[in-house]
Image: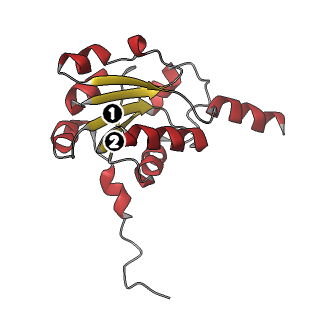
Amino acid sequence: MTTGKPLDVPPAFEAKICPPGALSSRAARLDGPRVFTNGCFDILHRGHATYLAQARALGASLIVALNADASVRRLGKGAARPVNPLADRLALIAALESASLVTWFEEDTPLAAIRAARPEILVKGGDWPVEAIVGATEVRGWGGKVHSIPFLHTRSTTALIERIRADK
């Protein structure tokens, strides 16, 4: 069965991918309240999908900022990380229903992206105490809220990679 759509056209979800320089203007067009989160999201797993759905449920739209490849390497996760390059990680997160806009940052922290997006709600996973979340001071300063979302499914990309290596 054919749909009549050309196969050489990028999937619609790729329109959610936003270069950092356009983040401010594109984020401003999203429905509010806007939720912002960030991470590596190297090998997407159930914990990631659940967390992102929970984050989206806190507002009308969700902005996800990914660490660029060099930024992931500087986090000390290992020389072979990220497993998936930035372009692939961006596409996978953009394909999720919960993500409204997906961007990236080259720096060690997402502070510049948070300032550009100006979310009403900033979230990180349950392993982050609220007082340690980068951007919390800024978001609270413009009247926003900051949340640490408890994990429903404790998963880890690092643990998954270690299990794969052990099974060799």
**Front-most of residues 149 and 96:** 149
Who's the residue at 47% across and 32% down the image? 69
Horizontally, residue 164 falls left or right of residue 56, namely right
* Crowd band around label 1 with a 10 angstrom C-alpha radius: few (<14), some (14–19), many (20+): many
Horizontally, residue 144 falls left or right of residue 150, namely left
Q: Is residue 45 visible?
A: no
What's the amino acid at mark 1? Phe
Horizontally, residue 168 falls left or right of residue 54, namely right
In what element is the residue under mark 2? strand
Q: Are marks 2 and 1 in contact (CB under 8 Å)?
A: yes
Between discs 2 and 1, the one toward the N terminus: 1
Relative image position of residue 67 (x, y in whole percent): 43, 31
Residue 47 position (above or below residue 121): below
Residue 102 - label: none
Compute the Cα span from label 2 to label 1: 6 Å
Who's the residue at 49% across and 20% down the image? 74
In what element is the residue under mark 1? strand
Quadrant of res 157 = top right
Residue 62 - label: 2
Relative image position of residue 159 (x, y in whole percent): 70, 30
- The colour scheme is secondary structure
What residue does disc 1 label?
Answer: 36
